[in-house]
Amino acid sequence: MKELVVAALQLPTLGMNATRLEFYLKNAHSRGARVMLLGEFVLNHFFKELVSMPKSMVKEQSAKHIELLKTLAKRYSIIFIAPLVLVKKDAYHKVIAKVTDHSVSYYEQQILLPYPHWNEKKFFANPVAPLKTPMIFTVDGFKVMVMAGFELHFDPFWQAVTHHKVDLVLLPTASTFGSHNRWRDIIKTKAFLNGCYILRANRLGEYHDEQTKWKFYGDSMLVNPEGEVEMVLEDKESMLIETISKSVITHHRKSWGFERELRLRDAIDGVVL
């Protein structure tokens, strides 16, 4: 029976604090974790705070974090999935970095929040373009997809999960405004309908503007293919470490047969990214 130990770190913005990361990594390594997920705007400040920071400082911060994660990935034999802000041609890009002991690759978020109070689409220079398959990689026989938090809401990404037979979706978020129940319900439903595990890491901390207090509430969790929450963190700094099982995924997919019914009707290959 194939198993994979996964971890999620629930943190506020780290700044340059390497000691904090190392503390958690030692524990995760001792328990056999192979993948570590961080929330959005943990390695960098919340995007509204970036307005008052020099781009050179943000660029330096991101570069130092990548070097740190490369060192830790090699030391602890772990894969990091970590949202990051990159500066390219004097513009900000919102990406998710995959850092291993031998390589660094990036997934550039494709759909960003476009709302007046939270307009990442306007702030970042990520292109508006035809959708493509998100980052997918394999670790210890498990197929893993990286999906940016807001992208959870769009069906084409989940069509890709089914098409590519993804076992685990990694979902870094920066959710706030008391949206616990909505996020839980969506994640549980998506896990059940797509026969996969979903690991969510949501950041902590607060941001105040002239009118609003933004409280990032944590609630990081692992949801299994039956749509059940296996483990959830509350609203304090902490780490989740759990084991996922290939047999649980296989049993769910055979029992419910959602994918089988779609394939009988040629309803998968022609519509995915």
Image (cartoon, helix red, strand yellow):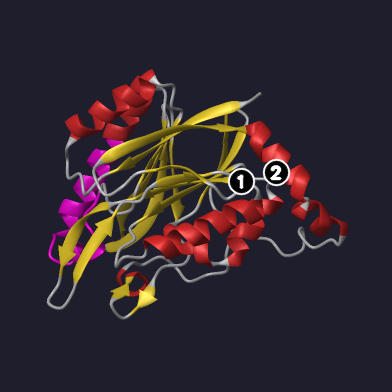
Mark nearer the N terminus (2 vs 1):
1
State the residue lying farthest toward the bottom.
116
Residue position for label 1: 225
Compared across the picture, whether 118 is left or right of 164 comes to left
Q: Residues within 10 Å of mark 2 (few under 14, many from 20)?
A: some
Give the camera-side residue of 195 and 106. 195
Residue at horizontal 23%, vertical 27%? 23
Q: Secondary structure at mark 2?
A: helix
Compared across the picture, whether 171 is left or right of 54 comes to right
Question: Looking at the picture, how far across and down is residue 16, in whole percent?
Answer: 17, 40
Task: Work out whether 232 lies above or below 207.
Answer: above
Residue at horizontal 57%, vertical 58%? 189
Magenta residues, start to end = 44-67
Residue 171 within the segment the image draws in magenta: no
Compared across the picture, whether 273 is left or right of 181 comes to right
Task: Please say if the residues under marks 2 and 1 sit with CB atoms less than 8 Å apart.
Answer: yes
Which of the 4 image quadrants contains residue 114? bottom left
- Give the amino acid type for the residue marked by disc 1 in the picture: Pro
Task: Work out whether 19 lies above or below 226.
Answer: above
**Screen quadrant of the N terminus:** top right
Q: Main secondary structure of the magenta part?
A: helix
Residue at horizontal 34%, vertical 31%? 70
Question: Looking at the picture, how far across and down is residue 47, in whole percent?
Answer: 25, 63
Residue at horizontal 24%, vertical 42%? 237
Question: Looking at the picture, how far across and down is residue 232, in whole percent?
Answer: 40, 44
Residue 252, disc:
2
- Give the amino acid type for the residue marked by disc 2 in the picture: His
Residue 56 within the segment the image draws in magenta: yes
- Residue 152 in view (yes/no): yes
- Residue 133 in view (yes/no): no
